[in-house]
Amino acid sequence: NAGVTQTPKFRILKIGQSMTLQCTQDMNHNYMYWYRQDPGMGLKLIYYSVGAGITDKGEVPNGYNVSRSTTEDFPLRLELAAPSQTSVYFCASTPHPGSNQPQHFGDGTRLSIL
Amino acid sequence: QQPVQSPQAVILREGEDAVINCSSSKALYSVHWYRQKHGEAPVFLMILLKGGEQKGHDKISASFNEKKQQSSLYLTASQLSYSGTYFCGTGRPYGNNRLAFGKGNQVVVIP
């Protein structure tokens, strides 16, 4: 059971570079989420998707973009990397919108921007 | 609105008990509890829904107090494996299962 898979696990970027963080789930979950986690700050929602072709902003969307062309994949794109985007990024999924559904997290991508 | 978790950190010896809290300024509908070990992903523990139901996971249980707008997590007879940061996430009834996470309670269990 792969669950939620994120790649890469680690990445160092230079200021101004762009990159895509990949997230794939094999549980046929409709709902997917991107969070960032800064030290001591908990998880902040960046973007989420309720199904293929539908995405919406979370709390901290600035500087990021997402797309959802399939149920399985939910990539997160950083267009112009800034030091403030240094963080650990987690992707999560849940089968459907009920509040009694746990979120399944990937192992995270640790991103440093220098 | 981000829930407030307290205390920030707890150090306890193996076998001791501890209580950590998650408080919201808004009416609670659901509370999710996750545990995260250093360098790893958050792992789901349990969900409590409006109604005051108490749940358990091993010797970890939680309660939901609607009146106080608070959930408490009880670590009973703590084990070394309980060490980690515990996050609560609060949900809304029509929020697409969006959760607002607190900053976490760091728990360290020592031998």
Image: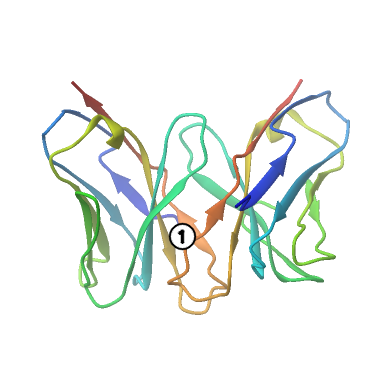
Q: Position of residue B57 (x, y in %)?
A: 27, 54
> At 47% from the left edge and 45% from the top edge, which residue is drawn?
B42
Residue A92 at x, y percent in the picture? 60, 54
Which quadrant of the figure has residue B76? top left
Instruction: Tell me the colour scheme of the image.
Output: rainbow
Q: Quadrant of the C terminus of chain B?
A: top left
Location of residue A12 with respect to A55 vertically, above or below: above
- Residue at 21%, 34% in the rendered image: B79
Left or right: where does residue A16 sit relative to residue A26? right
Query: What residue is pinned by disc 1?
Result: B1
Indicate whether B16 appears above or below B4. Answer: above
Q: Residue at position x 82%, y 60% from top?
A: A67
Q: What residue type is labelled 1?
A: Gln
On the image, the x and y values in percent for residue A71 come to 75, 67
| Image coordinates for residue B39, horizontal then vertical, percent | 51, 29
Report the side of A39 relative to A45 (left or right).
Answer: left
| Label 1 element class | loop
Label 1: chain?
B
Q: Is residue A65 above or below residue B25?
A: above
Q: Residue at x 60, y 46 (%)?
A: A106
Q: Is residue A75 shown left or right of residue B87?
A: right
Residue B67 or residue A26, whichever sits in front: A26
**Left of B46 or right of it: where is B76?**
left
